[in-house]
Image (cartoon, rainbow, N blue to C red):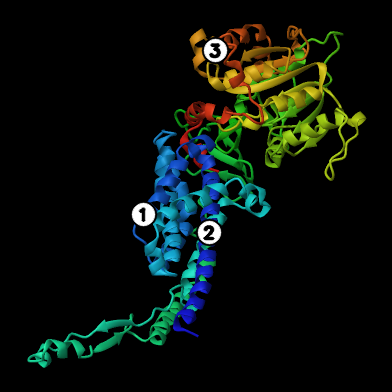
Amino acid sequence: MSSHNAQRRPSVFLNALSKAASVIVLVALSLVTFAYRRYLEPLYGSGPTNHHFTKVVWAACIAGSFGPTLPILPATLTAGLLLLAMPNSAYWVAVYSGRLGDPVWGPVITHLVVIAPVLYIGVTLVKALQQSVDQEDAQAGPQQIITLPICQTAITSLQGLWPAIAIVNESIESDIFLHTGTLAILTWAIWPFIPSFETPKAPVQVTAPQDTKSTTGKTKQQRKKAPEKTTSATQPAAPPTQSKAVSQRGAISRSILVPLLPVLTMTILRSPTLSKPLTEPYYHPSYPLRILSSAHSTFSNVVVVGEALPPSSLEQPVAGIANSLRYLRAGHSLLGGVWIGPKVHVDDDTEPLRDEAGEPLGDSIYSTFVLQEAARMSEKPNGEPRESALIIGLGAGISATAFMRHNVSTTIVEIDPEVYNAAKRFFGLPTPDQVFVEDVRKWTRLRRHVLEGGSQPAGGEVLRKEDIPKYDIIVHDCFSGGSLPAHLFTQQLWKDLKAVLEDDGVLAVNFGGILSSESFRSIALTLTSVFDTCRIYHDSLQPASEEVLRDDFLNWVFFCSSSSKLAFRKSRTSDYLGSPLRQRVLSTLPKREYPLQKVLSEVSETDRSRYLLTDEKNPLIGMQEESSMKHWTIMRQVLPDVFWETY
């Protein structure tokens, strides 16, 4: 067998091993990127986090592809240290950049400081693994140009896959950083004990210099015939067994540090956020803030119930902080809240609502949830009251609780079990008739399919047509984090909901945003393409000018029906449940309406088709970038930074 074939065998094996290692590095980078984006959501929300994120990923991949190739061992160690530091570095950099008050450049600063170095080192590792197998082949091809698209595509293309893997989706993001960092450090420690990626190279032939004296006086022909003296040399000069032994002795000394990793990851390297689930209430040392509950969520990273405590005789309220309120938070969005302590007010000697521990609860801190209750005041042709309601997106359960207190049979569909648990424990939600903790698209699609005579799908919930109820009221409130989940605002969903709504029933849809925005137009035109009648109302408690109504960020509620007539009766004392806020909102309902046709008339007939939202064509996410930035700024004004930083 020739020496060429003998050297080719290990080259093929090492090439396959190198490719496998490269895939592992790219999968790890994609997983860390996925976890990092979710880790930032409580501090920045999804909109600001993702605004320039792809550009930062591209920049890091370009730098890693065209920058100098780092040695494998130091690069692995550096990547491991950065990953182990990430629970703290990502949190604290995001905290301080968030205090700048800029939802665009704050996340960019965080990306550049925290995730970009990890991506850069990861890409250089992939490049080094390819070059170390066969240096001559690596130099012969455009290695950097090949590395760039492969790395960038691999990192981004797997982002949609990770949520489908249960063990990943249910993991705490900081644990993913620590586990991948620990794996990198272990690899660095045992590296000298695994086969080298470098292919053994043949001895280099070096021609010895000729002795000019010995050839002096010889004829040209004699000098030509004289044999050349050669010597052979190999690189490195040290014997391979000796260098390997030295390397392994270094590995043994490094491996002594390995047992310390579990201790470090369980102590100083852990995330500075609160433990999840929180075992007892947490009191902030310098702010009148108490956290009652903090739970990990696979949908919004974290669900928190906190309180801005009322001032006492021993402490003064911090300037700018509304006190005596309890709030429900998911990610960087408030799902609702109620007044507590001295701000609990009820009229007509009505007993206040109480939480699971018996603490009295006051009015909602947001009037939009009370505005949704106006659906119960919509008139039926036969004059009978509304008897059944479907709530999609529970929040703190303000409207759902009100419906149940009015003896309306209520069904809840909420995707996040932690939100439902928080509403039950801390916001006085009674036990509904039915609860479905699942995605509403799947829930509604199945019911419409069965109602239209379709066959039952294999597996899953089994339904009969006669067992599927229709509802007098459907409340759709899926606004969160400054943006709307685009797949829950398409024609297909509205048609599915229409199938489970009574012919004279009313659909209430919450929209948080700007009336003159493209997203509002899209939702309005899509709703009116499915329902015969739609009307819109704002929840502002202060008199608002036309300019404010059109250009400010407000909460709006659409009321839609398949009936050609949608009218609301006057409010009654019994509608208020002893709540001053309900009286203020429901008694002024006619003054809150804005002419929807005025907004729709601004869109030409030829342009209307491009605004319609379908499962196949849904530009809603792109339309909401500006409003998501504005929402982040508003949330930072509603509660101070420290409230958002404590979870």
Q: Amino acid at mark 1?
A: Phe
Q: Nearer the viewer, mark 3 or mark 1?
A: 1
Q: Nearer the viewer, mark 2 or mark 3?
A: 2
Q: Amino acid at mark 2?
A: Leu
- Left-right relation of 67 to 542: left
What distance separates the C-alpha of mark 2 from that of mark 3?
A: 49 Å
> Which residue in the protein does label 2 denote?
178
Which of pointers 1 and 2 lies earlier in the amino acid sequence? 1
Secondary structure type for disc 3: loop
Q: Which residue appears at 34% of the width and 85% of the height?
A: 238
Q: Is residue 603 above or below residue 640?
A: above
Point out residue 248 in the picture as x, y percentages from the top left corner. Answer: 44, 81
Which of pointers 3 and 1 lies earlier in the amino acid sequence? 1
- Closer to us: 566 or 284: 566
> Which quadrant of the structure image shows residue 41?
top right
Where does the C terminus fall, quadrant-wise? top right
The circle on residue 171 is: none
The circle on residue 542 is: 3
Pointer 1 local density, CA inside 10 Å: few below 14, some 14–19, many at least 20? some
Q: Amino acid at mark 3?
A: Gln
Which of pointers 2 and 3 lies earlier in the amino acid sequence? 2
- Closer to us: 585 or 592: 592
- Left-right relation of 343 to 82: right
Q: Which residue is outermost to the left?
A: 217
Q: Which residue appears at 69% of the width and 40% of the height?
A: 416
Please say whether residue 195 is visible from this viewpoint: no
- Left-right relation of 293 to 634: right
Secondary structure type for disc 2: helix
What distance separates the C-alpha of mark 3 from that of mark 1?
A: 58 Å
The circle on residue 66 is: 1
